[in-house]
Amino acid sequence: MAYKLNFLINKQPVEIAVEPHLTLLEVLRDHLAMTGTKEGCGTGDCGACTVLVNGEPVCACLLLAVEAEGQEITTVEGLATGDGLHPVQRAYIANGGLQCGFCTPGFLLASVALLAHHPHPTEKEIRETLAGNLCRCTGYDKIVRAVQTAAREVEHA
């Protein structure tokens, strides 16, 4: 039996009927064609599927879509506005905070949430916040520098 769900995704109202066993990740990728959110581990350990639910980072592979009913969801597709990249996206590019890009959407959204709550994070706070996101390509120094750069950019915006 399908459930009819309503939520805001990237500030757009979405109504969709889904089976109750589907995760938010499956609905985003397979039913709404929002493929920026990636499945890495399927167990909530890698952070590749991180989205924001009401501004808080959540592993979309662990959240049933029915649990997101009525919530505001932000995916990586919702960060840019028009032709302009989000300051965090620009900072990741400028600092080489990405390579293959598979983990990048999760890192970006975790970084956006961190800066929304802590506009001036210390390096330790950045590293602790991003500890749930794994990258096999960059090491983490460039990612940390990207968040520091984004914090300065947001501060001066």
Image (cartoon, rainbow, N blue to C red):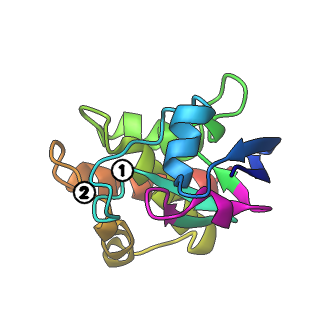
Look at label 1 and name its amino acid.
Ala
Say which residue appears at 79% left-offset and 45% top-offset.
Answer: 11
Q: Quadrant of residue 131?
A: bottom left
State the image quarter where residue 78 is shown: top right
Q: Position of residue 22 (x, y in %)?
A: 54, 52
> Residue 50 appears at what percent x and percent y?
46, 55
Q: Residue at x 68, y 52 (%)?
A: 1
Q: Secondary structure at mark 2?
A: loop
Residue 61 included in the magenta stretch of the image? yes
Vertical position of residue 76 compared to residue 112: above or below: above
Q: Dot 2: few (<14), some (14–19), or many (≥20) neighbours within 10 Å?
A: some
Q: Is residue 50 left or right of residue 128?
A: right
Q: Nearer the viewer, residue 24 or 124?
A: 24
Question: Which residue corresponds to mark 1?
Answer: 48
Q: Which residue is mark 2?
A: 134
Q: Residue at x 60, y 34 (%)?
A: 31
Cβ atoms under marks 1 and 2 closer than 8 Å:
yes
Q: What segment is highlighted magenta in the picture? A: 58-72
Q: Nearer the viewer, residue 130 or 42?
A: 42
- The amino acid type, in three-letter code, at marker 2 is Leu
Q: Measured from the top left, where is residue 59 in percent x and y? A: 45, 61
Residue 105 visible in rendering: yes
